[in-house]
Amino acid sequence: MRQVFAVFKRELGLYFRSPVAYAIAFALMLFFGLFFSSSLSSANGQSPADSVNFIPNLLTFLLFLVAPLLTMRLLAEETREGTLEVLMTLPIRESQFILGKFMAVWAYYTIILLLTAVYHIILTTVGVPDAGRAFGMYLGAWLYGGATLAVTMIWSAVTEDQVVAAFLGAATVLVLYLAEVAATAISNLPNVPPTVGSFIRELGLQAHYETTLLQGVIRAEDILYFVFMIIGALFITTRIVEVRRWRS
């Protein structure tokens, strides 16, 4: 674990020394603040407090942009600058290296998510929001973020071009986000078994967040979906880095 913590500490420090990371956090908080203020003003005295507590859901939607921006440099920059091969000569396994980097970017995302909790605190001063629903909402957004970050890391390992890695990562997250739409369209096609649409729907991110965790319903299958998504994506990333190490 010392090797994992060393990589984690290094990467997290790079995030807090990067102007891009601060710019992303500032843009998100400004965007959320403006929307929250506008929604709170329009809903005051007209709607329940829970109707304004949409920030975690909005953050998960924006992850198709945020996740690739946060992960595109993790491995692509190391490869382009030739430092990945140097790091691979250290007494550390590829899995520890990848896990440390992933934990760092997930920790940075967690900090941003925790900052948005201030909006829930504000709601408690003007209404009585459902604490159980809020917990499920934030838990789901945290797991959702971990899954998308792990998936987009794959593309950072595949290519040394950060722009290409970000584009492919965004496309992948969008496909997983829109799986619900694709499943509905396929289910409406003639001669297509309903199980096909259900299978595609279950592969998507929204099926395990929007109708359950976002509503405060915590199911073991949804949590396991995100956990296995993270493990699977990190496994693929590790195998890619291992292949690159063998070739070098």
Image (cartoon, rainbow, N blue to C red):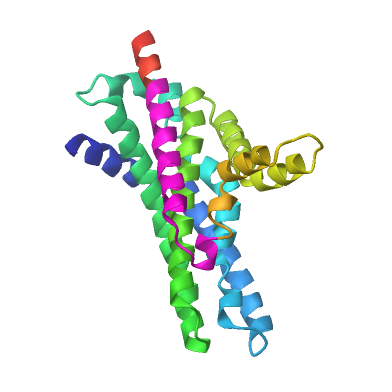
Residue 225 counted in the magenta span: yes
Indicate the position of residue 97 as horizontal and vertical percent values.
30, 31
The magenta span reads 212-240
Task: Look at the image and tell me whether residue 127 can be seen.
Answer: yes
Q: Is residue 198 left or right of residue 114?
A: right
Indicate the position of residue 191 as horizontal and vertical percent values.
79, 34
Q: Is residue 45 left or right of residue 128?
A: right
Residue 54 picture quarter: bottom right
User: Quick check: 144 above or below 92?
Assistant: below
Indicate the position of residue 117 as horizontal and vertical percent values.
45, 69
Q: Could you tell me which residue is drawn at 82 percent across and 37 percent down?
A: 190
Q: Residue furthest top?
A: 247
User: Quick check: 39 above or below 57?
Assistant: below
State the predominant SS element of the stretch in magenta: helix
User: Quick check: 141 above or below 191?
Assistant: below
Indicate the position of residue 160 as horizontal and vertical percent values.
50, 24
Residue 93 counted in the magenta span: no
Q: Which of 207 and 121 is in front in this view?
A: 207
Q: Is residue 161 left or right of residue 157?
A: right
Q: Is residue 33 left or right of residue 86?
A: right
